Image (tube, coloured by chain):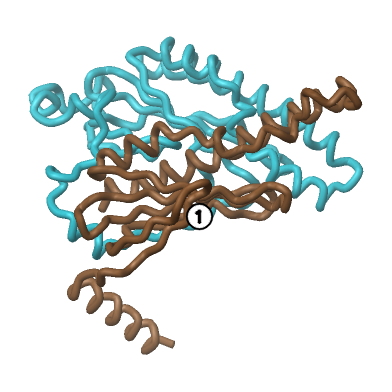
Chain colours: A cyan, B brown
């Protein structure tokens, strides 16, 4: 990720958030406010709902009342260069949000994708329809591998492709298994 | 050191209280005349990192006439391929968000590198060029989406 600079002073000048809101118009965001206040304040596991704002690539942040229910990731192999973790949230109306974080070596993580669905099966379906390889910064990876591995760069890149695909499949499977167990308990 | 930091913080606080200064801007456009206006720069961001052959710079401005302008620049390391400069108009911050969410960076990528009408190029070379083109499009989309996500998150926070 590069850099971002916000001119807070100029932004403050624009006026009230109601007049110039960039608030989104889809998904659970609409359901907060009065309707959310009248609903239960915690999930079946007794976790209290909070207002959550998630950054997502290419879109306005996703805002909802909910709780973080799990972080799913494979145990990390120290030789791994690129790895992912999925954070799972339950919204106040029993829908689900998944956020996929991508890590590249010691860099800061980036948000690779955010999905929202009324069921875990639906969330898994959305995830399966994505190509996890398209989330990856291949040019950055290539540059690093050529520098660090020279002739072996292509083999190393092939192993990253294989790992990313396998990891993604594992994460979806783990999400379905552990979350259903967790939610049922 | 401590004093320098305090002075910098004080300057920033004074600037914030005084409000932003109107500035004159001139935005270059690929294939069209430049746009000149007075206003404020609300935010600027850049996706440059070592490695990728291209990167984006996004700027959002509020004009004196209360409109908004989005400056989109795509820079490339390839000297044969020119940089792209686009300026898009928006009526509100909500409109800015809508435009950015619907912008497809694939249109910024020059597809002429895949020379489908050249008989001297083998199918293997052509396929490789097509794969490379697809990689560039995905890279452009990924970088652009990352920037847009960051900007919209920060603006919503602001």
Q: Position of residue B82 (x, y in %)?
A: 64, 50
Q: Position of residue A30 (x, y in %)?
A: 20, 26
Whether residue A121 is visible: yes
The answer to whether A36 is drawn above or below residue A19 in the figure is above
Binning the other alpha carbons within 10 Å of mark 1 as few (below 14), some (14 to 19) or many (20 upward) gives: many
Mark 1 element type: strand
Q: Position of residue A45 (x, y in %)?
A: 28, 23
**For the point 43% across and 56% down, which residue is it?**
B34
Q: Give the residue number, with chain letter if any, for mark 1.
A: B46
The residue sitting at the front extreme is B33
Residue B37 occupies quadrant: bottom left
The answer to whether B96 is drawn above or below residue B39 in the figure is above
Residue A119 occupies quadrant: top left
Whether residue A185 is visible: no
**For the point 67% across and 55% down, which residue is it?**
B50
Along the line of sight, the residue nearer the viewer: A161 or B151: B151
The answer to whether B28 is drawn above or below residue A80 in the figure is below
Q: Is residue B57 left or right of residue A17?
A: right
């Amino acid at each position: 990720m590069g850099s971002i600079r916000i001119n807070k002073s100029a932004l403050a000048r624009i006026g009230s958030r109601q007049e110039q809101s960039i608030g989104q118009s889809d998904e659970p965001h609409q359901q907060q406010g009065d309707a959310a206040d009248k609903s239960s304040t915690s999930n079946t596991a007794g976790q209290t709902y909070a207002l959550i704002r998630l950054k997502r690539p290419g879109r306005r942040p996703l805002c909802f009342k909910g709780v973080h229910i799990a972080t799913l990731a494979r145990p990390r192999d120290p030789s791994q260069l690129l790895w992912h973790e999925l954070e799972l949230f339950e919204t106040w109306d029993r829908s689900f949000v998944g956020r996929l974080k991508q890590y590249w070596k010691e860099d800061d993580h980036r948000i690779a994708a955010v999905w929202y669905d009324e069921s875990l099966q639906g969330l898994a379906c959305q995830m399966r329809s994505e190509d996890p390889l398209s989330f990856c910064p291949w040019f950055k990876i290539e540059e690093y591998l050529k520098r660090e591995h020279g002739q072996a760069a292509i083999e190393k890149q092939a192993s990253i492709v294989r790992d990313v695909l396998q990891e993604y499949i594992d994460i979806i499977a783990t999400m379905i298994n552990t979350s259903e167990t967790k939610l049922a308990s | 050191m401590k004093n320098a930091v305090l002075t910098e913080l004080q300057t920033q606080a004074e600037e914030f209280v005084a409000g932003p200064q109107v500035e004159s801007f001139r935005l270059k456009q690929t294939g069209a005349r430049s746009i000149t206006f007075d206003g404020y720069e609300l935010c600027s961001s850049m996706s440059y990192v070592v490695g990728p052959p291209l990167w984006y710079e996004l700027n959002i401005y509020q004009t004196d006439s209360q409109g908004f302008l989005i400056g989109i620049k795509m820079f490339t390391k390839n000297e044969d391929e020119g940089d792209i400069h686009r300026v898009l108009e928006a009526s509100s911050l909500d409109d800015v968000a809508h435009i950015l969410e619907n912008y497809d960076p694939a249109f910024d990528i020059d597809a002429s590198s895949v020379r489908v009408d050249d008989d001297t190029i083998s199918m293997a070379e052509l396929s490789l060029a097509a794969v490379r083109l697809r990689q560039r499009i995905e890279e452009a989309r990924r970088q652009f989406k990352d920037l847009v996500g960051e900007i919209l998150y920060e603006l919503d926070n602001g």
